[in-house]
Every structure is written in C-alpha cells, then in structure tokens.
Image (cartoon, rainbow, N blue to C red):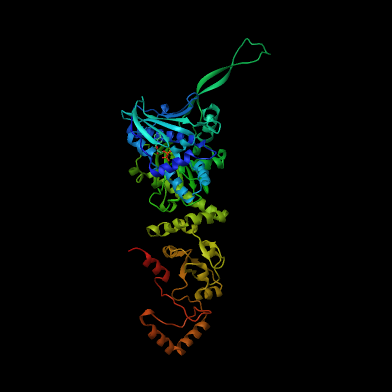
Amino acid sequence: MASKKQFKAESKRLLDLMINSIYTHKEIFLRELISNASDAIDKLYYKALSENLSDVNREDFKVYLEVNKDARTLTIRDNGLGMNKEELEENLGTIAKSGSLAFKKELEEKEKKEEADDIIGQFGVGFYSAFMVAKKVEVVSKKYGEETAYIWTSDAIDGYTIEETSKDSCGTEITLYLKDNGDEENYDEYLQQYEIERLVHKYSDYIRYPIQMMVEEQRRIENEDAKEDEEPKYETVKELKTLNSMVPLWKRSKSEITKEEYNEFYKNKFNDYTDPQKVIHTSVEGAVSFTTLLYIPSKTPFNYYSQDYKKGLQLYSRGVFIMDNAEELLPEHFRFVKGLVDSQDLSLNISREMLQHDRQLKVIANRIEKKIKSELLLMLKNDREEYEKFWNNFGVQIKFGIYNEFGAHKELLQDLLLFYSSKERKLVTLDEYVNRMEEGQKDIYFVSGDKVEMMDELPIVKKVKDKGYEILYLTDNVDEFVLQTLMNYKEKNFKNISQGDLDLDSEEEKKEKEKKAEENKDLLKDLKEALGEQVKEVKISSRLVDDPVCLSSDEGMSFEMEKVLSAMPE
Ligand code: ADP
Ligand code: MG
C-alpha cells in the first residue's frame, strides 16, 4: 500500500473550491477531461511523426467513454502519450498549469466564492474540475515506451496515492466515481447516454479524434412480409458510436460558425474567462496556404508583463498539432494576440530551432502581421470606442513596437497611435492631427506632462493655443521616445513646445521683444548672476501669456526625457 501524499497548499485550495462548488454548470468537467485526452493524443502523434515510430497509427487514436450504471462510474480513456509516476505526481498533484494558475490569480483578486464559481465554468480549471461531480477519481496511466503502469487515486480531501498497476497499452484511463449524496447531490445524468452525447456535441465536437461510446439505439426491424397496417417493430441494438464531427473549428466555413462558438473555443483553448474583443479568421491560398484563427483578448492578461507570459501562436500542420507558442509567428509588437495557424505547407518534423529559418513560416508570419494591422485599422476607423478599449489594454505594446529595433517597424505602426489632443479633448491619431493643421503651421506640436489639467495650465500651452494650434499632450513616459523615433509624420516634424524657439511671433512682435530685451539688459544680467549655474540663460520670452516667468529647456533633451532617463536603472 502506497503512502498518502498531500496536495500542495495552493492545489488544495482549488480542490476545496471544486468539491464545494455551487456552480451550476458542472458539466464542463467532461469537456476538460476530453480536452486533456486529446492533448495527450496530440503529443503521441507528434512524437510518432517526428521520430518515425512504426507502432503508432493515426487511425487507432480515439477517446473512449464508458458508463457503468451499477458502479456509478464514468470512464474517459485515451490512447495518447500517457504519464509515468513522476508526471502523475507533477501534473495532478500541483497547480502548475496555465489554466489553473490564471484561475488562482483571479481568485486572489475576487475573494468572494460566488464569483469564483462563476469563473470556474467559463474558464475550465482542467483536471480538478472532475471533483465537482466525483467523490473519488482514479487515473490509470502508462507512458508510451515505458514498462510500468501506475494508478493515481484521490478523494481530494485526504490527498492522493500512487501505486503500480498493470495496463496493456499506453495511454490514460480516468474513472470518476460520481457523487451520490441522495437527491440533493447526485449526478445520475452523467450516466445517461443522451446527456453524454449532448455534452460532447456541445463542447467537444471539434476534437480531431473520434470520441466514442457504446450506445443503445432502437432500430426498426425490417420485415418484408409485414402487412401495410401492421405496427413497425423495433429492437434494441448496441453499437459503437462516434459522438463528435471531428472537424476543427477553423476548418469550418466562417458563415457557419457562430460568435458563441468562436468565443467558447477561445476561452477553452487559451485559458481566458472573458470573451475575446476581436476574432480574426482567415484562409490564404497561394504559394503558401494556411488558415489562421486569431484573437485579441478583451483584457490585458494578468501575467502579461511577467516572465510567465508566452508569446506565440499554436502551430498545426494539416490539422496535426505541432507546438504551442510558436514565437516566430508573431512580431513582438503584436504579442498580445492569441490563436493558431494551420498550414499544409509546413513540415511535420519542424522543430523550434528550425522555425527561425523556415522560409514558409516567414511568409506566414508576414501575412499575419499585415492582417492584424489592417484589422486594427478597420476597428479604429469603424468603431472608435472599441479601438480605445484595445488601446487601453495594449497601446503601450504598439508604442514600444515603434521605438524597438531602432524604429524598424515605425511605418507599420504609426497609424495605430493615439495621443490626447488639446483641441479635441480626446485621443486622436497623427493623421487626424495633420489633416486639420492650420494654414502656415509647420510642425506637429506636443508637450509632455503627468496630467492633462497640468499641461493645460502651462504658459507656453496657453500661448500656442491662443495662436489656434492643436497640441498633443504626452502623458506616457514612452511617448516622447516614440515621437523621437518617428522623427516626422507625413513630412511634418514633431516639435516640443517647451523647448527651444517656436518661431510663433510676427515681425512686429519680434521687434517688440528685441526692444524689451535691450531695455531690461541689466535686470536680465542681475538675474543670471543671482541664479548662477542653475540656469543657462535668462531671456525675455514670448512664451508667456499670463505668467511672469517660466523654465524652458534648450534644444536637445527635454525635461521630461531627462526625468525618464534618470529614473531608469543604470
Ligand atoms: P492543462 O490541460 O491546462 O495543462 P489540466 O489540469 O487539464 O491542465 O491538466 C494538467 C496536466 O495533466 C496536463 O498538462 C497533462 O500534462 C496532464 N494530463 C491530464 N490528463 C492527461 C491525460 N489524459 N493524458 C496525459 N496527461 C494528462
Ligand atoms: Mg486541460
């Protein structure tokens, strides 16, 4: 008898939640277990293809469901890669996986139980969701290429055990002992053939391997001699039935896919619990043919700015899963995009190292980048409110994209930028600014500061506004770097109004200024002497409207940039 092991503390908490869940859509447990089975088959299939294994055949792959009404068990069996002892321990004893981890994070923010229940379903929390309906779970698994099989058993509460067992072929078999606390909480429905068929159809239809079950069906007995008015006779036959259509979502025609289906697929596959903001589904035929299904999340992922966040798309070749997070498919500036690519032109044996040099893949990545950009531009044009939501979530990424790699991507990205306008009192694009520039206005004016209200009060802002010009208010640290990288937009230079000479004055005003400077020569000299090295120069200025003095920086680095740079770690 193997000794009992306890779950890691954080897993324990998640399990408690699962056991006590009042969530009404507990049915999602089946989707989670089937998706794990399918993942495990994917892994073995990929291994077989890349290592030329002769004892693995695509046609043999399946997920098999079995009900035992007397024992009140439901079994999900797959002939995928399987797990060895260490993997059972590691994968089922700890929250290590993306989905559960995101869930846990979310939980910490929303301490309330009802809300937790609410997100379980939308999210799926993987394997542990089995404990919403089962009082005990057994996992028998044998890893491909290994001799020994193991059985992992747990009732969640007392931890788990792992022991040796026997199993003929590789793969995993998960048996759920359904709860039976009288009428209050029993899950008899999951022992019913029709309910299981319904669930598979609803959640797992697109799984690419057959999900099979023995079913009982009424079949009419053909009787040639029967008289016309005789009642038809039926018999009950048992047969093996494939419950899913096996067509991957992205292979179906766009017009037949509902928004709901797109969203469900996204949430399941990419571990989000909110619907995506945008779905981009396209097929390209040509020198390189491929289909992509891309999503822009509607929230910044909780780990977006941490090392855990993995950029990249899932890669498939002819519907065969190759790898997760293929980085080369997405440029850094669109790293927030999730999704997948399926191409018939990629070799199944492609490895991560090879991706970097693959010509076909470069072509695909290029098309994807262009497509994302054009979709964003469309959103900007047709639905400003949506675009601003996007900008709030991921605008910073676009800005970094501009000044990264010495501005290599500025042409691509510049039209996606938004800045706050002194005139419009909202976010505007550079194109909008340039299109309404005043007659005779040479430059695009901007000023930096922490807050819009503060910038409104700057003397020089008042002055420029008085002249009727629009000013871009830069509130983000990176903004000034962005403009500096761009250098110009549609041949208009960017001009920081708090720096250097703006040349706003008419000839008359210039003469007036010279005259004043001459008259106050001594005063200016005294002031400079009094301030000493703290200032470079004291001048009569035309920058001021209502205020007596202002600090102004010379051409070169602005105050704001100096501030940012000095705040950076060495
Ligand atoms: P996720 O699927 O997001 O990784 P799960 O909680 O659903 O998280 O599963 C945890 C891990 O357990 C999986 O990543 C996988 O390594 C392993 N696992 C679960 N079910 C199976 C299975 N049927 N065959 C092989 N491994 C499995
Ligand atoms: Mg899973």
Image point (46%, 70%), residue name: 495
Q: Using residue 384 as the reference point, say whether residue 176 is left or right of it.
A: left
- Judging depth in this view, the residue of 66 and 405 nearest the camera is 66
In the picture as drawn, the residue positioned furthest to the top comes out as: 225
Let me know if residue 275 appears in the view: no
Q: Quadrant of the N terminus?
A: top left
Q: Position of residue 357 (x, y in %)?
A: 34, 45
Q: Is residue 235 above or below residue 454?
A: above
Q: How many marks?
A: 0
Task: Tell me which image quadrant ligand 1 sits in.
Answer: top left
Q: Quadrant of the C terminus?
A: bottom left
- Judging depth in this view, the residue of 344 and 299 nearest the camera is 299
Let me know if residue 116 appears in the view: yes
Q: Position of residue 43 (x, y in %)?
A: 38, 35
Q: Using residue 245 as the reference point, say whether residue 346 is left or right of it.
A: left
In which quarter of the view is residue 14 placed?
Answer: top left
In the picture as drawn, the residue positioned furthest to the left comes out as: 147
Image point (39%, 70%), residue name: 557
Q: Position of residue 228 (x, y in %)?
A: 67, 13
In which quarter of the view is residue 384 placed?
Answer: bottom right
Q: Is residue 37 above or below residue 357?
A: above
Q: Using residue 17 as the reference point, say whether residue 183 is left or right of it.
A: right
Q: Position of residue 471 (x, y in %)?
A: 52, 69
